């Protein structure tokens, strides 16, 4: 039997570190879209704080909501606080809202320095984070998770970070935002393919759960294709080719007979590819801007 994680480590694990590239990559790439010598570092730091706190808050909110609903009773993925019963559910809920509140504070600071319109976008992002698995009709249970991930962890994060540099956005930011959003969706699909059996049993109707383990693998391929399309259309065809090659091991795992815990490697692989592609884009932009 695996020993329970320590008091601090359990919170770290429940924050799901492998999902955090979905927050930091679009911010880093969005900032790098401008000339390096003109990057507004304080605004970038605030944008990164907002993105990371929203991601961690969403992960804790997901932990709480799935735990109290019983969705995690047959969990095969990473450690969960609520389902493990090592931490009272209300503490997990408080932690989620604390992260959302800190994200709001950072967002207010960013809005004060750039545009007050960011408050409305930030508020919608917090609602999206909570309602993913929270509320009376969580959209994550309806197969809409990919749409919101593409929007908030791709287009909004990338274009928004590019905008807060000098309050203007270059056209390529939208295509690159599509690419970073698709990377985040690939990470989500890796997670959902792993949890297909448990989600079906719990009534959580993600797109992967609706299609089933075998056909759901094509969702991962679709995400990879969107990554390449966004990069190529955004003026980075070489990086698009690198992305296709980098995702080959993940595609093979998606179409393999692996199920449940055996697919944890797909989540790990997707996370590493997302970080690597984000770093490559930043290097390319720094070298060519």
Image: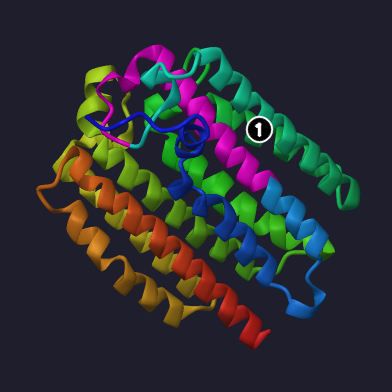
Going 35% across and 62% down the picture, which residue do you hit? 225
Q: Main secondary structure of the magenta part?
A: helix
Going 56% across and 13% down the picture, which residue do you hit? 90
Residue 66 appears in the figure: yes
Disc 1 target residue: 99
Q: Please check the rendered image and state whether residue 59 is part of the magenta-colored stretch, yes or no.
A: yes
- Viewer-nearest residue: 233 or 213: 213
- The percent position of residue 75, horizontal first and vertical second, equals 28, 27
- The percent position of residue 243, horizontal first and vertical second, equals 38, 71
- Viewer-nearest residue: 72 or 171: 72
User: How is this picture coloured?
Assistant: rainbow
User: Which secondary structure, mark 1?
Assistant: helix
Quadrant of the snapshot with the N terminus:
top left
- Viewer-nearest residue: 175 or 224: 224
Quadrant position of residue 259: top left
Going 50% across and 75% down the picture, which residue do you hit? 280
- Does residue 262 appear to the left or right of 221 in the view shown? left
- The percent position of residue 180, horizontal first and vertical second, equals 51, 59
- Does residue 56 appear to the left or right of 140 in the view shown? right
Relative to 157, is 172 above or below? below
Give the crowd class for mark 1: few <14, some 14-19, many >=20 residues within 10 Å. many
Q: Which residues are magenta?
A: 50-77
- Does residue 259 appear to the left or right of 234 in the view shown? left
């Amino acid at each position: 039997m695996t020993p329970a994680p320590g008091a601090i480590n359990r919170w770290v694990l429940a924050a799901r570190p492998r999902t955090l590239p979905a927050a930091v990559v679009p911010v880093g790439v969005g900032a790098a879209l401008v000339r390096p010598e003109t990057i507004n570092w304080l605004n970038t730091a605030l944008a990164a704080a907002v993105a990371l706190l929203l991601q961690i808050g969403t992960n804790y909110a997901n932990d709480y909501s799935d735990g109290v609903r019983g969705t995690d009773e047959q969990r095969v993925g990473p450690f969960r606080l609520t389902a493990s019963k090592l931490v009272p559910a209300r503490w997990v809920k408080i932690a989620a809202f604390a992260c959302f509140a800190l994200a709001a504070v950072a967002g207010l600071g960013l809005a004060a320095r750039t545009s007050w319109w960011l408050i409305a976008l930030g508020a919608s992002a917090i609602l999206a984070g909570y309602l993913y698995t929270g509320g009376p009709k969580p959209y994550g249970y309806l197969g809409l998770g990919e749409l919101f991930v593409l929007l908030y962890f791709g287009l909004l994060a990338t274009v928004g970070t590019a905008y807060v540099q000098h309050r203007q956005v270059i056209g390529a930011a939208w295509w690159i935002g599509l690419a970073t959003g698709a990377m985040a969706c690939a990470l989500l699909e890796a997670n959902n393919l792993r949890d297909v059996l448990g989600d079906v049993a719990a009534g959580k109707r993600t797109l992967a759960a609706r299609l089933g383990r075998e056909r759901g693998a094509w969702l991962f391929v679709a995400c990879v294709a969107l990554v390449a399309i966004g990069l190529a259309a955004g003026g980075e065809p070489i990086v698009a080719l690198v992305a296709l090659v980098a995702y080959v091991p993940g595609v093979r795992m998606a179409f393999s007979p692996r199920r449940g815990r055996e697919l944890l490697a797909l989540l790990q692989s997707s996370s590493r590819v997302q970080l690597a592609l984000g770093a490559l884009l930043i290097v390319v932009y720094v070298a060519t801007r």
